[in-house]
C-alpha cells in the first residue's frame, strides 16, 4: 500500500515535470492518454474488480462527449455540461446493468456490445441532434477559476488534475466496504450473496460508476479534440478499451495506466514500422497475452510467487539435509 | 409483393452466409469455450488466399481446395495450438483480448502486405438473371443459398449421424464424461477447429463476390455472425442457420421499408430481445453449465 502510493507520487511528478518540454503533438498524446486512463479506470471497476464482462464502454464515452458538445453548442457552460453528462451516464449505466442481472459472461458481453451499436446508430443517424457523420465542431474549452484552458499545456494540466482526483476517489471506493463487495461479486457471487451482500445492487452500481468515469472522460475528450463525430465511439473503441484494461492487468489499481499506454501510446511509437505498425501492435498484444495472461501488472506477483516457490524448495532442501545428517 | 419476395430471397441468401460464420463460431464455443473475435478475419484471409491462387492461374475451385488445406493447418491447428490451448485455462478475458489482437494484426497485415483496396472476386455461380413469376433472381443468390444450406445441413448431419460427430458433441456437452468414455478429447476439439476453418473458407467463397475482397470485410461479417449465433441459439447448430436468415432478411426488409440508415437496427432489436428473454436462443435448449 505504501509502495503503490510512492509509485503513484513518482509517476505524478514525472507527469507534471515532463510535458512542458514536449512539442504540442506530444502534449496532445499525453492528454489523450489521460482521457482514456480515466475511461479505463471506470471499465477496470466494471470488468476487473466487479467481474462484469462489458463491451459497451465506448457508448458512455460517446454519451459524455456528445452531452457536453451539444450543450456547449447551445451556449451552456462546460461546468453544467459535465455534471449533466455524469448524471446521464450514471442513469443509463444503471439501466445497462439490468441485463447483467439476467445474463453473464459472453451473453453479457454481446448485450453490452449491442447497446454500443445502438448508441452509435443514433449518433450517426440523428442529424438534428448530433450532426450525424459531419459531427460537431468548434467545441470550446472551459475556464477554471478565471484561468483560460485554451492552450494545450493548460488543458493537459486540467485533465491531469481531474485524473488525480478521480483516481483518489476510486482508491477510496475500492478500499471501502464497497470495494470488497465488488471483488466478492467477481470471485464468488453465490457466496457473496449468502454473506448478505445485495449482489443486484452492486452489479448495477459497478456499471453505473464505471459509466460515470467514461462520461467524464468523454466530456474531456470533446473539449480536447474540439471536434467529435460518431467513429471514435463505435464498437471498435469498446474493444480497444477492454483490450487496454486486460493488457494492463484487470483488477490492479494501476492496470489502466499501463494498459492505456499500450493502447494509445504504443501504436504511436510503432509508427517507424509505417504501414505495418498496426500489424506489429496486434501481434504484440497476442504475444503479451500469451506471456502474461493476467496483464502487465501481474509481473510483480509472478516474481513474488517464484521467489516464494524458490524459498520453499530451499527450505525443504535444508530440512532434508538436516534430517539426513541426523540419520 | 414481388419486391417483398425478392428482398426476402436475397436476404435469405446473405443470411445463409452469416450462418456459416456463425456456425463455426458456436462450434468453437461449445467444444472448447473459445470465443473467437477474429472470426471475420478468418473469412477474409481465405478470400485473399483464393485471390492469390487465382492470380497464379489456378482455377477457382482448385484454389479453394488448396486454401481449405492451408486454412485447416493455419486457422485450425495453428490457432488452436498457438492461442486457444495456452490461454483457455485463464478464463475468458485473455482469449478475448488475444483474438482481438489477432484480428487487428491480420486485418492490418493484409492491408499493408497486400492492398487496401477492394478487389473483385469471381463468382462460382455466374450472374445470370432468372425470372420466376415476376420475381427476378440472380443465379448467385440461388447458388449461394443452396450451397450454404447444404453446408449447414451437412455439418449438422456429420455431428449427429457419425461416430466422430457424436463424440464431438459429447465433448461439447461434458468434457469429463467424454474423457472417461475413452473419447480422445484434444482430437475432437481439433476437429471443431478444423471444421470452423473449413466453414470460414466456404463462407469466403460465397460471400466475397458480393462483399468484394477487402481487408476490413470481416468486421461487419463478424458482428452479423455473432448476432446470428446468439439469436439462433449458442448451443444448437441448426439455430445458427435460423439466426443467420433472420439477420439477413431483417436487414434487407428494414433497409427497404424502415430506413436504410437503420438497416442494422432491426436485427439488433431482435438480438437484444433474445438475449434478455431467451438467452439460450430461439432454437437452443436451456443447458445448465457446470460451475
Image (spheres, grey):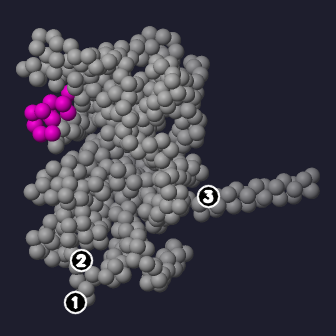
Residue A15: x %, y % from top left: 46, 79
Q: Looking at the rendered structure, which numbered label has been put on residue A302? A: 3
Q: On the same chain: label 1 and label 3?
A: yes
Q: Position of residue A162 (x, y in %)?
A: 33, 76
Pointer 2 local density, CA inside 10 Å: few below 14, some 14–19, many at least 20: many
* Host chain of mark 2: A
Per the image, label 1 sits on a secondary structure element best described as loop
- A108 is within the stretch colored magenta: no
Q: Secondary structure at mark 3?
A: helix
**Rendering quarter of residue A179:** bottom left
The residue at 23%/51% (across/down) is: A120
Q: Give SS at disc 2.
A: loop
**Mark 1 or mark 2, which has the lower sequence index?**
2
- Name which quarter of the figure residue B8 lies in: top left
Q: Nearer the viewer, mark 1 or mark 2?
A: 2
Answer above or below: position of B33 versus B95.
Answer: above
Kindly indicate whether the residue at mark 2 contacts the one at mark 3 (C-beta within 8 angstroms): no
Q: Earlier in the sequence, mark 3 or mark 2?
A: 2
Give the CA distance from mark 1 to mark 2.
12 Å
Q: Is residue B257 magenta?
A: yes
Residue B50 appears in the rendering: yes
Q: Is residue B93 left or right of residue A123?
A: right
x and y, in percent, of residue A111 in the image:
28, 43
Mark 1 vs mark 2: tell me if same chain.
Answer: yes
Q: Residue furthest bottom?
A: A146
Label count reads: 3
The dominant secondary structure in magenta is: helix
Q: Which residue is mark 1?
A: A146
- Region rendered in magenta: B249-260
Mark whose residue sits in front, 3 or 2? 2
Amino acid at each position: 500500500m505504501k509502495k503503490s502510493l510512492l509509485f503513484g507520487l513518482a509517476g505524478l511528478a514525472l507527469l507534471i515535470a515532463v510535458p512542458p518540454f514536449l512539442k504540442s503533438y506530444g502534449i496532445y498524446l499525453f492528454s489523450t492518454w489521460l482521457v482514456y486512463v480515466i475511461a479505463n479506470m471506470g471499465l477496470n471497476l466494471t470488468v476487473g474488480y466487479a467481474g462484469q464482462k462489458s463491451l459497451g464502454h465506448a457508448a458512455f464515452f460517446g454519451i459524455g462527449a456528445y452531452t457536453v458538445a451539444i450543450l456547449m453548442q447551445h451556449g451552456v457552460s462546460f461546468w453544467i455540461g459535465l455534471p449533466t453528462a455524469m448524471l446521464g451516464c450514471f442513469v443509463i449505466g444503471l439501466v445497462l446493468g439490468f441485463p447483467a442481472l439476467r445474463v453473464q459472461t459472453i451473453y453479457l458481453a454481446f448485450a453490452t456490445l449491442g447497446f454500443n451499436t445502438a448508441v452509435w446508430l443514433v449518433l450517426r443517424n440523428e442529424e438534428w441532434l448530433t450532426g450525424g457523420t459531419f459531427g460537431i465542431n468548434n467545441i470550446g474549452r472551459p475556464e477554471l477559476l478565471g484561468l483560460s484552458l485554451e492552450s494545450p499545456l493548460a488543458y493537459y494540466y486540467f485533465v491531469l488534475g481531474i485524473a488525480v482526483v478521480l483516481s483518489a476517489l476510486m482508491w477510496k471506493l475500492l478500499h471501502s466496504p464497497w470495494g470488497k463487495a465488488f471483488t466478492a461479486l467477481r470471485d464468488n457471487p453465490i457466496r457473496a450473496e449468502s454473506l448478505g451482500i445485495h449482489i443486484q445492487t452492486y452489479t448495477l452500481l459497478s456499471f453505473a460508476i464505471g459509466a460515470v468515469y467514461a462520461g467524464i472522460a468523454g466530456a474531456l475528450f470533446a473539449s480536447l479534440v474540439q471536434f467529435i463525430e460518431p467513429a471514435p465511439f463505435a464498437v471498435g473503441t469498446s474493444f480497444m478499451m477492454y483490450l487496454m484494461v486486460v493488457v494492463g492487468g484487470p483488477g490492479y489499481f494501476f492496470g489502466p495506466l499501463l494498459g492505456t499506454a499500450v493502447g494509445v501510446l504504443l501504436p504511436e511509437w510503432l509508427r517507424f514500422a509505417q504501414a505495418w505498425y498496426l500489424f506489429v501492435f496486434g501481434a504484440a498484444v497476442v504475444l503479451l497475452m500469451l506471456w502474461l495472461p493476467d496483464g502487465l501488472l501481474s509481473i510483480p506477483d509472478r516474481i513474488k510467487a517464484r521467489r516464494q516457490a524458490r524459498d520453499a524448495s530451499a527450505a525443504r532442501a535444508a530440512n532434508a539435509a538436516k534430517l539426513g545428517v541426523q540419520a | 409483393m414481388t419486391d417483398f419476395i425478392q428482398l426476402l430471397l436475397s436476404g435469405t441468401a446473405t443470411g445463409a452466409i452469416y450462418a456459416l460464420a456463425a456456425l463455426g463460431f458456436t462450434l468453437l464455443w461449445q467444444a472448447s469455450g473459445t470465443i473467437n473475435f477474429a472470426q471475420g478475419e478468418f473469412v477474409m484471409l481465405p478470400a485473399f488466399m483464393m485471390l492469390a491462387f487465382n492470380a497464379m492461374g489456378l482455377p477457382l475451385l482448385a484454389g479453394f481446395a488448396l486454401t481449405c488445406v492451408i486454412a485447416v493447418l493455419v486457422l485450425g491447428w495453428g490457432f488452436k495450438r498457438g492461442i486457444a490451448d495456452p490461454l483457455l485455462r485463464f478464463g475468458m478475458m485473455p482469449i478475448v483480448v488475444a483474438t482481438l489482437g489477432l484480428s487487428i494484426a491480420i486485418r492490418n497485415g493484409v492491408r499493408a502486405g497486400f492492398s487496401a483496396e477492394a478487389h473483385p472476386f469471381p463468382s462460382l455461380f455466374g450472374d445470370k438473371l432468372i425470372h420466376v413469376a415476376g420475381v427476378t433472381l440472380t443465379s448467385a443468390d440461388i447458388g449461394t443459398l443452396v450451397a450454404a444450406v447444404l453446408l449447414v445441413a451437412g455439418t449438422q448431419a456429420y455431428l449427429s449421424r457419425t461416430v466422430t460427430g457424436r463424440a464431438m458433441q459429447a465433448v461439447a456437452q461434458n468434457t469429463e464424461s467424454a474423457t472417461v468414455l475413452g473419447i480422445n478429447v484434444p482430437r475432437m476439439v481439433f476437429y471443431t477447429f478444423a471444421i470452423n476453418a473449413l466453414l470460414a473458407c466456404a463462407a469466403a467463397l460465397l460471400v466475397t463476390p458480393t462483399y468484394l475482397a477487402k481487408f476490413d470485410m470481416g468486421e461487419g461479417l463478424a458482428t452479423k455472425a455473432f448476432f446470428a449465433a446468439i439469436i439462433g441459439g449458442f448451443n444448437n447448430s441448426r439455430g445458427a442457420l435460423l439466426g443467420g436468415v433472420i439477420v439477413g432478411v431483417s436487414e434487407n426488409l428494414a433497409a427497404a421499408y424502415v430506413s436504410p440508415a437503420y438497416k442494422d437496427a432491426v436485427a439488433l432489436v431482435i438480438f437484444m430481445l433474445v438475449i434478455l428473454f431467451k438467452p439460450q436462443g430461439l432454437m437452443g435448449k436451456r443447458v445448465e453449465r457446470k460451475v
